[in-house]
Amino acid sequence: MTEVCHSLPNKVELPDGWAICYNAREFFCKPRKKFMRITHLSLTNFRNYGRLELTLPAGATLLHGNNAQGKTNLLEAIYYLATTRSPHINQDQQLIHWDALQTHDPVIVGRLVARVATRQGERQLEVRLINEQKGQQYSFRREALVNRRKVRLMDLLGQVRAVLFLPQDVHLITGSPSQRRRYLNITLCQIDPIYCRQLSTYNKLLEQRNALLRQMAEGRGGHDVLSIFTERLVTSGSELFARRGQFFSNIARETQHIHYEQLTDRRESIRLRYLPNLHDSPTNSSETLQLADWLEDHLQQPERIKERFWQAMQESKAKDLARGSTTIGPHRDDWAFWVNGRELGLFGSRGQQRSAVLALKLAEINWMTSQTGEAPILLLDEVVAELDEQRRALLLNYVQSAEQAVLTATDKAMFSDPFLQQATMLYVENGRISANPTA
């Protein structure tokens, strides 16, 4: 039944943020949803897009076409504006259009620009990827702008938020701890600016402390300076431990609810655990889990976390000096799933692993919405084909209720007719986007 909602007239006094809605049967009041969506996307010299101007509607947009035509690149552009990171590569210079790099221009610029609509108004976000030639040397740098004013890249985070679904997301379970930390940092930095600043500070201090440890191994540097770096690292790292722990405490409950109630018909219980690296070489998994429990019990006691981290750093000092690097801390954290008491990465089937990742991503959507009051943009890259009918229906239900979602597919037949009828269809071919495949 179709609902139509309007803002309340001034003469009607109801709580702020409510609207008068009506359908075919009755009038009623309900909270207005806060929204965030990209209204226009402009790409210049980005991947295989030499130049693109694209108006994006609310609701679901399905990008379809053959492989290697630019569907994934468009999702990557939106995700990059949200996170300042590519989900596919570590060298940002590779994002610049290949043909542009083959020219002899001394300065080559790739640009990603988005107009973003929110309840607070419209804003313009821009990232510039700049490749410069100075003599025989090339240099690469990035610039960020909000409403045409230069800002730090860090200040771009949170201006638009997105949750990305990829076929390879199962690597969050089967892959390396560094992949899981990357996911954790990108997710938290979209929501928590304090976390992002502390992460930047921690990484700089870690680099400085490691450089000093290498100097001391060569007979240079002193223990007094090492103590200063250690104290600063502990202060910053303790904040990361606490904020990561709080994030997992919140999202684990939502993940369990979705997995147990909606994905496995109450057959499988899942537990998501944060595994902080707060100890010098735990001897077994039981000790690691005990440490995880300890941190969860002390999330509201930052001084206790700081004391525990400081003690661990003192215990690992000799090892750090021998190796020339810092061996414990948030930079070595991990997290993992347990299903029915068994670690999923070691004992779970491929189907169980996919269900766990889907539950995590859906929980991420709910968590972001609850934290900000605005639903994130959903980006789905060929993931519908990876799911069975039940999981596909659950995911598309989230898509259809989202303020904005962008999906890619090579085969439209995997979507139901009702979904295709309500979605905006765009055809992608060789870096060009049209509403009609024959255009």
Image (spheres, rainbow, N blue to C red):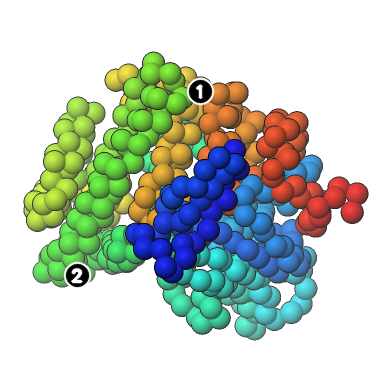
Residue 119 in the image: above or below residue 135:
above
Instruction: State which quadrant residue 258 falls in.
Output: top left
Q: Nearer the viewer, residue 72 or 203?
A: 72
Residue 209 in the image: above or below residue 163:
below
Instruction: State which quadrant residue 284 falls in.
Output: top left
Q: Earlier in the sequence, mark 2 or mark 1?
A: 2
Q: Residue 183: percent from the left, percent from the top?
A: 43, 47
* Quadrant placement of the C terminus: bottom right
Please report the residue visible at 42 percent of the width from the left and 56 percent of the height from the top. Answer: 18
Q: Which of 420 and 255 is in front in this view?
A: 420
Q: Name the residue under label 1.
A: 350
Disc 1 is placed on an element classified as: helix
Q: Nearer the viewer, mark 2 or mark 1?
A: 1
Q: Residue 194: percent from the left, percent from the top?
A: 30, 64
Q: Residue 272: percent from the left, percent from the top?
A: 32, 33
Disc 2 is placed on an element classified as: loop
Please report the residue visible at 40 percent of the width from the left and 59 percent of the height from the top. Answer: 17
| Residue 379 falls left or right of residue 107 | left
Q: Name the residue under label 2.
A: 221
Residue 223 showing in the rendered view: yes
Q: What residue type is labelled 2?
A: Gly
Q: Residue 12: percent from the left, percent from the top?
A: 41, 63
**Within 10 angstroms of label 1, few (less than 14), some, or many (20 or more) residues?**
few
Please report the residue visible at 44 percent of the width from the left and 75 percent of the height from the top. Answer: 152
Q: Which amino acid does label 1 sit on?
A: Arg
Please report the residue visible at 36 percent of the width from the left and 59 percent of the height from the top. Answer: 14
